[in-house]
């Protein structure tokens, strides 16, 4: 039946991945405690795909419960998304982040041992590289000291998975280092649901365009980049979801054990001003924005060398920045219409 355990499957990236898993013929089993997501997302996945994913509501860090709840399924792989992700909050409440992000990863590794599931895809991040010395960033670029407890949890989880692999050569694990996921499903039925004031550029743009935020501040235009604003590698969330399907298929088909770390990005960097201008152009919307001071902790520029994932997973991005920004705006308008509280 090809059951795949998807922790955090009701979240932003997890929900899009569940859609693509179902479209590819897999049966996702979502484990989510809804600490940062909404239950209607499960119905929306069904609305898009015609198939309701199995939901196990609970904390994937609670290992005895997880082992019990999954006993009746033969699960071929696990995609472990569940984590807290707010960089700013992690500096104020580091223990909350260590407990959840590390604790849930330990619990999943223990679960793999007892359940016999061999295949793991882990959600990592390009934050492990900090400000890289050479661009684009390859997987060989050294990890830099983490800028936040959140970033440190990603580095630590990667190390834990690698150490565990050394002790149990039965497992196959890929850590996917995401660059900057943006956009939403083109149906506008699922997308990102940021709680409170968004930290990320695109939700801030769409909320400003929708009148929820008065003004967008561009943090600094005196960086060493062509237009002076920071550069990131923005990847459409549907492309990112498809990378997970390729990763789990790759692991299932692979006979030998392995642990590997893979960049998931487009390979192209776009500046903050480019994103703003593109958003205005493709959506015909004028944004109220101003140039402000640099924000502490911001990295000047980072974008992926995507050649390894292109080769190993036969995956490449299909969607453009324009499409991502159109989908993000369509999603924001759908949220407004349904008066979803943010
Ligand atoms: P999200 O907050 O939308 O989704 C995470 C989901 O996990 C939520 O549904 C939440 O309720 C659930 N969850 C959290 N802790 C849990 C636990 N202990 N047990 C069960 N469920 C739990 O976040 P996202 O943007 O979809 O991110 C998914 C993963 O990707 C995270 O690990 C995140 O660190 C990583 N990541 C995200 C980004 C990004 O920009 N969104 C970038 C790099 C890496």
Image (cartoon, grey):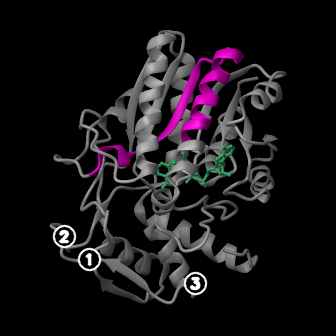
Q: Residue furthest right?
A: 72
Which disc number belongs to residue 220? 1
Tell me the magenta residue range: 101-130
Q: What SS does tag 1 mark?
A: loop
Contact (CB < 8 A) between labels 2 and 1?
A: yes
Residue 117 on the magenta span: yes
Q: Is residue 40 above or below residue 9?
A: below
Q: What SS does tag 3 mark?
A: loop
Identify the image quadrant of the N terminus.
Answer: top right
Q: Is residue 21 above or below residue 43?
A: above
Q: Residue at x 65, y 52 (%)?
A: 11
Residue behind label 1 places its C-beta within 8 angstroms of ligand 1 = no
Residue 119 percent coordinates (x, y) = 58, 22
The secondary structure that dominates the magenta segment is helix
Residue nearest the observer in this picture, 186 or 107: 107
Q: What SS does tag 2 mark?
A: loop
Question: Dot 1: few (<14), some (14–19), or many (≥20) neighbours within 10 Å?
Answer: some
Q: Residue at x 44, y 20 (%)?
A: 163
Residue carrying label 3: 210
Question: Dot 3: few (<14), some (14–19), or many (≥20) neighbours within 10 Å?
Answer: some
Residue 171 percent coordinates (x, y) = 53, 15
Residue 267 percent coordinates (x, y) = 31, 48
Which disc number belongs to residue 223? 2
Residue nearest the observer in this picture, 190 or 341: 341
């Amino acid at each position: 039946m090809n059951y795949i355990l998807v922790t955090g499957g009701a979240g932003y990236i997890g929900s899009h991945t569940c859609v693509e898993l179902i479209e590819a013929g897999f049966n996702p089993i979502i484990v989510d405690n809804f600490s940062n997501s909404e239950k209607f997302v499960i119905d929306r996945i069904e609305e898009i795909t015609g198939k309701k994913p199995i939901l196990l509501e609970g904390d994937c860090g609670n290992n005895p419960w997880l082992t019990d709840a999954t006993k009746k399924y033969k699960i071929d792989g696990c995609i472990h998304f569940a984590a807290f992700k707010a960089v700013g909050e992690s500096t104020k409440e580091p223990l909350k982040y260590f407990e959840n992000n590390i604790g849930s990863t330990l619990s999943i590794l223990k679960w793999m041992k007892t359940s016999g599931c061999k295949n793991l895809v882990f959600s990592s991040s390009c934050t492990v590289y900090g400000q890289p010395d050479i661009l684009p960033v390859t997987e060989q670029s050294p990890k830099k000291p983490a800028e936040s407890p959140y970033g440190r949890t990603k580095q630590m989880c990667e190390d834990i998975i690698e150490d565990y692999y050394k002790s149990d050569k039965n497992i196959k694990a890929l850590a996917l280092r995401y660059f900057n996921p943006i956009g939403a499903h083109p149906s506008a039925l699922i997308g990102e649901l940021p709680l409170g004031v968004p930290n990320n550029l695109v939700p801030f743009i769409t909320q400003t365009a929708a009148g929820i935020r008065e003004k967008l501040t561009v943090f600094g235009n005196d960086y060493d980049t062509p237009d002076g604003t920071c550069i990131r590698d923005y990847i459409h969330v549907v492309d990112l979801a498809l990378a997970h399907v390729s990763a789990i298929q790759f692991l299932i088909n692979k006979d030998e054990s392995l642990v590997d770390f893979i960049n998931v990005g487009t390979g192209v960097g776009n500046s903050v001003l480019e994103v703003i201008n593109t958003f205005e152009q493709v959506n015909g919307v004028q944004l109220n924005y101003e140039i402000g001071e640099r924000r502490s902790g911001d990295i000047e520029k980072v974008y992926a060398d995507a050649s390894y994932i292109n080769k190993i997973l036969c995956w490449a991005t299909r969607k453009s920045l324009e499409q991502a920004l159109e989908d993000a705006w369509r999603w924001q308008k759908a949220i407004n219409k349904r008066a979803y509280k943010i």
